Amino acid sequence: MVSGMRKAGFPQKLGTWWICLASVCLACIISTQAPSDSGGGDVHARADTAYAAEANGASNSTAPGAKDRTTIDSLVRNWLRVPTLEHSVVGVEVMALPSGKIMYSYNGSKRFTPASTAKAITTACAYDLLGPNYTYKTTVIAEGTLSNTILHGNLVVIPSQDPTLTKGQLQELIKEAVQQTARIDGKSPISQIDGQVKVARQSNLDSGFHQSWLVEDWGRYWMPVASNLVVDENIANSGDLKLLDNYRIIEAANTHGALFDMLLSAPDGPSWVYIDRANRALFAYKPHNPKAPKEPSYAVANPDDYNLALIEWMVRRHGIRIVGQQINFTGKENVYQLAQHSSKPLAEILKTCLHESDNLYAQEILRTLGLHSLAQSKEKEQAAQGNGGTASSGDIPLEDRGILEISRWLTKIGVPGQEIILFDGCGLCRKDGVSPHALNIIMKHMAGEKVNGGYLGLLKANDESGTGKGAYRYKTGTMDSIRAMSGVLTTAGGENLAVTVIVNGHTPSVRNLRIAVSALISQLRVLKHIGDGPYKEAPGAADDPSITTSTHEGVVMDTQALVRKAKPARHSKGRRRRH
């Protein structure tokens, strides 16, 4: 099934109405009266009856407040009996924070396909290793010699894996670089490049589109191809293609392959563009169904080559001739840094990735971790060579380097090695396997000892602590038959829990499972106290028995008066009066 929901985890906004609906549904289940059962009956009715009996078991006592007493074990075990989950595979774990004490675990150490909750792993690792203030820096350099406005060498763009770079920002970067060439020798900007315009590549083995992803994900807006240089999230429209005026646009009639031809026959089929630089051609593929959009957006199939052509177009706009010679350097030529673009701080990029569940962002962040690992490997190699030894980091794709970097980080923070298997950074691969326990350990680590770690502020949040319903900061994951949610929950009583729920093997329908998972979260959020010790309401709480009268009259406060300073008293210069 092709589903646009792959772009983001559920729900888009865990709004108040979802929680209210979930709570009502769960309350209805708990309060259901057991129907007569003569040995047959509907299995859902029997499950609801068991759920109701278990939930109501704690309400037999007549002691004050007894009806509110239950256990986390009963609460979660009753939830597992919801008919919605009957034919699905469920994993759930509740962990106390910051202690890490496991309060309930059902298949908690088993691996599940995590969907977009895998992004929580990638982004948490990046936040921890690179820091929230890390910025991507895309640089333009000139290598060679400059004489009389002619660059005998190459103009090179050094990418940084920045997923946020736009075409407008790239144009400004190229403009600044061209202007800076005039300051090298105090003359006019360059008018000719004898060599080539290039995009530096950190690895020659990168594919950008993981071989384990489904074919239905190809050519889709929710999963553009990752690359060293990303421009406009590697999505192009018809107007963008026409900018490359020295390339022929060829609307491909077919793909010469039955599989993709079948996909292109659908009204919501994929659209992609492939650039052939050798033959100066752009092959545009789009659905040929009459109901398909006439001017779709195209996923760029080979973005490093396409974006290079875009840079060449930008350079020519400044009246610069690109000769295109292959110039061999001896290593003694000059290198001039001309311009540099800095991205927003990493924390903001991670927040966008988490909130929008952006797959390209996650893959580029994974590649960034790979680049970080590569830089460390090169430093070790140089140190080894300096000590007379030899070392080789090898040519490994950045995605694979990123996975290795995450693996080392997971080991460092105490995640059991067999509880996570990752093939990508976004969770689109169905071969990924993650346990609820592993996600909870990650949440515990990112929360810190005071459960106020900066990373938690990047997660989506549903905060109703003002109404006694606690708060939940979370990441969701959704694919066909897969639903997941992981985050840090603060109860109505102010206690903190890491809660992860993953459901695999469900029906493609989202609504009923969304309600069911939200119901469990809403029940945990309203916990006032955890433990067997005595509980006493805080003075002045809504149900404090000491409050005998409260008319709830509305008032208007002059809050400025609370901070307004009184004018100093003025004394006359004459003799003070005696009283």
Image (cartoon, rainbow, N blue to C red):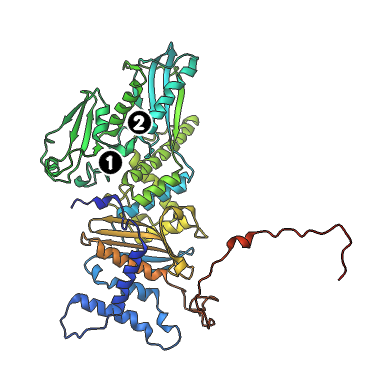
Would residue 167 be visible to someone looking at this image?
yes
1 or 2: mark nearer the eye: 1
Mark 1 or mark 2: which comes first in sequence? 2
Q: Is residue 549 above or below residue 346?
A: below
Q: Is residue 504 above or below residue 260?
A: below
Q: Find residue 224 and name its label.
A: 1
| Residue 39 image-quadrant placement | bottom left
- Lateral position of residue 319 relative to residue 278, left or right: right
Residue farthest right in this picture: 575
Image location of residue 82, percent across then percent down: 27, 72
Using a 10 Å C-alpha cutoff, classify the residue at mark 1 as few (fewer than 14 neighbours), some (14 to 19) or many (20 or more): many
Read off the residue under disc 2: 201
Q: Nearer the viewer, residue 396 or 266?
A: 266
Badge 2 marks a residue whose secondary structure is loop
Location of the C terminus by quadrant is bottom right
Q: Nearer the viewer, residue 190 or 83?
A: 190
